[in-house]
Amino acid sequence: MRRIRLILALAVVVALAGAAPVGALSSKASPSSDAPAAGATVDTGSAIVQLAGDPLSTYVRTKPAPGKKIDFNSNTVRAYRAQLNKVRNDFRAWLRANAPAARVTGEFDISLNAVAVRLNGTSLDLIRRAPQVVRAEYQGLYYPTADDPDLGIIQAIDAWTAAGGSPANAGEGIKVAIVDTGIDNTHPCFSDSGYPAQAQLGDHQFTNNKVIVARVFNNKTPSRGYTAEAIQEHGTHVAGTVACNYNTPATVNGVTIPYGISGVAPRALLGNYNVFPGEVQSARSEDILNALEAAYADGMDVANMSLGGGASGIQDLLTMAVDDLDQANMVVAVAAGNSGPGHFTVESPGSAARALTAGASTVPHFVGAPLNIDGDSNTYGIAAGEFETVPSDLTKLLEVVTVTSGSNPPVTSLSTACSALAPGSLTDTTALISRGGCTFSTKIRNAQNAGAAAVIVVNNVAGDPVSMGQDGTPNQPTVPAYMAGLGDRTALMAADGQSATIGATMTYFTTSNVDIMAGFSSQGPTDVDFRVKPDVVAPGVNVLSSIPQSFCEAGVDCFAFFQGTSMATPHLAGSAAVVKWASQLAGQNWSAAQIRSAIVNTADQGVLKDYKQGTTIVTDPNIIGAGRENLLSAVGAKVALDPVSVSFGAVPSGSGQTRTFTLTLSDLTGSGGTYGVSIGSLTGTGVTYSVSSAPVTLDPGASATVTITMSAAKGAESGGHSATLRVMSGSSEVAHAVVYTLIK
């Protein structure tokens, strides 16, 4: 198994993050470089061992009915748990006789029938020889990877009303587990004022009637005294996006945000399942499995996992657990990862077939300083971060630092300043350089050493500027430094030698840079079986949300702009909570699979743009999944599809194969209907798709299947071949899904 990275807002590759909060004591909200963070992917000293027998979530006699949960008090469930416990005891006995150094450190029977084992020098091959063992893997290590604009993008506020509720009760009673770095329950986003009394579980120091659970999961908790307290920022930011109380006032860097912050499901209840306690930066599979099983047993309806780690092979046991929990009716939203761009970069457990996997796109706002150029009537917004800012308005000549490459003809471009610049070449100027190639600290330091009085780094990806983080090395630069947006590069380069004024008064900027794919957003297809991932895209760049109060001065409520697929995932988790709430208001009780489908298969198509220039519409399903989510469409879904996308896997080039796939359609309206099913235009040549059994008539609450046939000619073009399956009610589309084949 793999180590999973908390897909932190700190950004890697082309990651984008936001301004540090006012009075921040310390912050990791900003990217320090354009290089991915390194980290071990597995813990070779421990293993997850799958034992014979289905877990409760999938065993035929204990698997819950659609829309229901496992009844832990039933005699059948109790008897089967005892049976699974006997298998675990038999395995322990085998260990004592054959591998006495190994120790069982954890047990699971809801999502997996498995145990966690500390190997203590025992080989994994020996463990696999036990008669009770089905599969054994090293434990993965996982890392913390509006007018509210992001709510407006996904039409959340309209969805609350369409569901028959209001902002005051959107998501009421739905429980969402945050498997992360903890939730600061003292933050105004999580005030329980006006909430009815709730049963509170775990450590009551960190719970109230809004955050109703606080548990910690780490094998070193006893010796190190770990608690569920939110020491790091990530989990509190994620939790705020899911369920910050409606219309909570926010201030960033002394700037009052001109609207109240709200979570996607502002009235939902939250569970704090802290798998990254204290300053811990990675979690083992065991910790995450324990958290997921505890969340399910605690009655959580949705789990958010803004984390990820390396993925290789068709499945690992953590992805299997996610799939099983979905079948037991807990929606699990997972980050695709921050390892993009490029195909085959989706991370585990976002690669799970039944995960609700999130890609990331831009939110068009940020807090920054105004930049004015003499003779230019425009005001340019430049984002502040962890570097110094000007204490008063600063006027200097703008010095554009360029580099020339090639000779036929030579090409002049903006320098990344990753190497030392000529001493004195930038004396008493504001230097303009480019993002990319090295850490922000390195390039700003090089400009300072050349005499610059201030530095502006131009972004190298489309969208708004984001805050820059320091790289932690000694002797950080001391000159003021900001980031400008890529769209302003041409105008700023043309202002070379002009007088430029950086304003000291920070401002809230809104722009038109919406629905641009984040370059860092991981892409599919998955390994081996070549399924489409992510499932759907949600806002994940410059997302404004809560962070722990400890990161701000006393008396200042703490908020910050973060970026990452970590920030997109809670939009989906909050959306799942709203969809479940809406289905209950309508007298329905949709299953986890139906909730996922409602979100994925009603997403907006044709709106997401490329990260390089921000203008070209992206159609590759392994970048955008089914599109950018639309919560208003999701709460009004009429038909669910299972699975949410169709993959025929890889077909060897020149083999000329025909394959079939069965897709299940289920009624979400309670009144049934008749639907046409068809497949539209294709990408590539040599592959065709067809659908049988159309039209399809669904009885109230019932389901039916259609067969999709893929035919690949022997001369089919290599690469991905995708099409869109559309479900129509008359002339209106009610659902769509990606159909995909890889010719290789």
Image: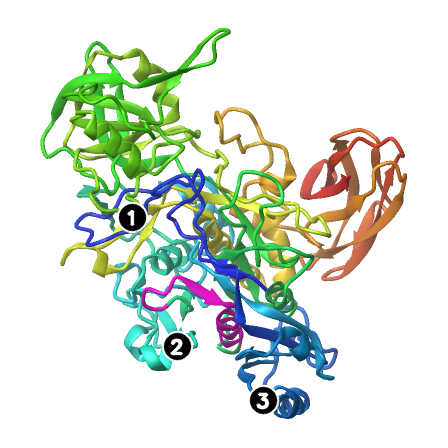
Marked residue nearer the N-terminal end (1 or 2) = 2
> Residue 524 appears in which quarter of the rendering?
top right
> Which label sits in the foreground, 1 or 2?
2
Residue at 47% over, 9% down: 407
Chief secondary structure of the magenta portion = helix
The three-letter code of the residue at mark 3 reads: Pro
Vertical position of residue 671 compared to residue 214: above or below: above
Disc 1: which residue: 560
Mark 2 Cα within 10 Å, few/some/many (few <14, many 20+)?
A: few
- Mark 3 or 2, which is nearer the eye? 3
Find residue 723 and report its horizontal and vertical position in percent: 73, 37
Residue located at (35% from left, 40% from top) = 147
Label 1: state its secondary structure.
Answer: strand
Q: Quarter-wise, where is residue 64 in the image?
A: bottom right
Q: Nearer the viewer, residue 228 or 582?
A: 228
Q: Where is mark 2, residue-wise?
A: 220
Q: Which residue occupies the foreground of this view, 119 or 700?
A: 119
Task: Please indicate, yes or no, whether residue 368 appears anywhere in the rendered image.
Answer: yes
Q: Is residue 355 left or right of residue 272?
A: right
Q: Amino acid at mark 2?
A: Lys
Position of residue 247 relative to residue 509, above or below, is below
Residue 116: x and y in percent read 56, 78
